[in-house]
Image (spheres, rainbow, N blue to C red):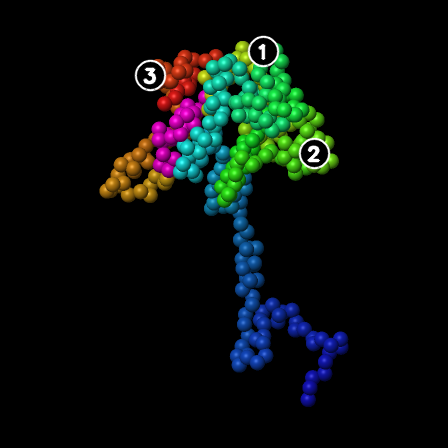
């Protein structure tokens, strides 16, 4: 005889005490034993009876039995060593990237005419502009009028161009931090153009009023940031100055106008295309206690156990007398000698 269903079509539930202690095995199973389910409740009860205790350490609440370790950023970021560890051909890549600035700096020092791209009021240049530097109109600096010492707006000499003054704009993806583009198969750097937020390139805008020729955009607003200062193109200006004018503004001149004048090791890399003179980035990064002490690894292990080296380019001469001796020994190398008026006492040498 079948059981009568309960009102509402649902069976009556077991009391709460029975539900918390056990659960029935589904029908059809040969084993009708009960499975205990109160283990979770026991864990909760034990936690309630013995709560986790905390103590304060370095301004933080830390569970008892644990210690805290504050992670602080490096006082002097060593970006050069990291870049060398990530690029096997670091020297040749760095030389190719900065070759145009090196050529521009040499011309500026020789002619005492500094053409640079930077933010007004800043004490550093974002880019040193040379003869092949691109203007907003799409033509190079060589295609504009020469500086005569009076008029600083160098008009474009290309036929039919309405450009009234040279305004530098990045012409390579690495100048705006888009380094990954060069790794794409079939990418041609000569086809790259700096673009506006409207989606059109700078040479599709009017040189004079910056209006777009392809859409209703009324002014060029860059969709990229400067790789040197992380600001937009329209926040920069192109400056044409003599050395004396730059010295009055506490801007680098002479040998200190060369790229990486404050980092002699890095400057040698972009001048020679080789980083063989720099310590290996892998030795400094490797664990110091995991290498065997026997066999051919003994020399390397001794090198690893040496004192930590300073970050590349920083505090390379901790002893002033040693720095003076080094400067005296290297002052005979290259065409640039003597201490300049600005930015430290490192010598810019060339091999």
Say which mark, if any, is on residue 149: 1
Residue at mark 3 to residue at mark 2: CA–CA distance: 59 Å
Which residue in the protein does label 3 denote? 329
Displayed quadrant of residue 196:
top right
Q: In this image, 95 relative to 239: left or right?
A: left
Q: Position of residue 144 (x, y in %)?
A: 59, 21
Q: Which of 344 and 161 lies nearest the eye of the viewer? A: 161
| Residue at the far bottom in the pictured view | 1
Q: Earlier in the sequence, mark 3 or mark 2?
A: 2
Residue in the picture at 54% in, 64% down: 39
The answer to whether residue 233 of the structure is visible from this angle is yes
Q: Which of 344 and 236 lies nearest the eye of the viewer? A: 236
Question: Answer yes or no: do the residues labelled 2 and 1 have beta carbons within 8 Å?
Answer: no
Residue in the picture at 58% in, 72% down: 23
Q: Which of 243 and 281 lies nearest the eye of the viewer? A: 243
| Residue at the far left in the pictured view | 295
Q: Position of residue 276 (x, y in %)?
A: 35, 31
Which residue in the protein does label 2 denote? 213
Q: Earlier in the sequence, mark 1 or mark 3?
A: 1
Q: Is residue 317 magenta?
A: no
Residue in the picture at 42% in, 19% down: 348
Q: Is the N terminus in the top left, top right, bottom left or bottom right quadrant?
A: bottom right
Q: Nearer the viewer, mark 3 or mark 2?
A: 2
Residue at mark 1 to residue at mark 3: CA–CA distance: 39 Å
Q: Position of residue 116 (x, y in %)?
A: 56, 21
The answer to whether residue 320 of the structure is visible from this angle is no
Q: Is residue 112 above or below residue 185?
A: above
Q: Secondary structure at mark 1?
A: loop
Mark 1 burial class by Cα count in 10 Å: few <14, some 14-19, many 20+: few
Q: Nearer the viewer, mark 1 or mark 3?
A: 1
Tell me which segment is drawn in magenta.
Answer: 261-283
Q: In this image, 206 relative to 125: left or right?
A: right
């Amino acid at each position: 005889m079948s059981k009568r269903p309960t009102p509402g079509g649902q069976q009556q539930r077991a009391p709460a005490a029975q539900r918390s202690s056990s659960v029935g095995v589904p029908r059809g199973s040969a084993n009708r034993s009960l499975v205990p389910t109160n283990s979770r409740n026991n864990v909760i009860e034990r936690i309630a009876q013995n709560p986790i205790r905390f103590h304060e350490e370095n301004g933080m609440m830390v569970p008892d039995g644990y210690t805290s370790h504050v992670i602080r950023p490096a006082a002097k970021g060593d970006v050069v060593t990291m870049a060398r560890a990530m690029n096997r051909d670091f020297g040749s890549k760095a030389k190719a990237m900065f070759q145009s600035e090196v050529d521009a700096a040499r011309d500026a020092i020789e002619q005492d005419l500094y053409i640079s791209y930077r933010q007004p009021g800043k004490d550093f240049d974002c880019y040193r502009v040379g003869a092949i530097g691109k203007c907003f109109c799409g033509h190079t600096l060589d295609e504009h009028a020469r500086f005569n010492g009076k008029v600083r707006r160098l008009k474009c000499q290309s036929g039919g161009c309405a450009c009234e003054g040279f305004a530098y704009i990045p012409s390579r993806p690495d100048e705006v931090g888009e380094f990954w583009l060069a790794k794409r198969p079939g990418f041609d750097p000569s086809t790259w153009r700096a673009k506006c937020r409207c989606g059109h390139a700078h040479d599709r805008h009017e040189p004079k009023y910056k209006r777009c020729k392809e859409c209703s955009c009324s002014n060029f607003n860059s969709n990229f940031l400067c790789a040197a200062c992380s600001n937009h193109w329209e926040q920069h200006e192109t400056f044409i100055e003599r050395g004396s004018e730059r010295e009055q503004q506490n801007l680098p001149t002479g040998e200190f106008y060369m790229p990486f004048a404050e980092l002699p090791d890095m400057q040698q890399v972009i001048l020679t295309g080789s980083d063989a003179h720099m310590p290996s980035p892998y030795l400094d990064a490797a664990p110091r206690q995991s290498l065997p002490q026997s066999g051919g690894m003994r020399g390397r292990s001794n090198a690893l156990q040496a004192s930590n080296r300073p970050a590349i380019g920083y505090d390379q001469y901790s002893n002033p007398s040693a720095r003076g001796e080094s400067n005296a020994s290297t002052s005979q190398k290259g065409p640039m000698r003597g201490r300049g008026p600005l930015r430290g006492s490192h010598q810019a040498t060339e091999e």
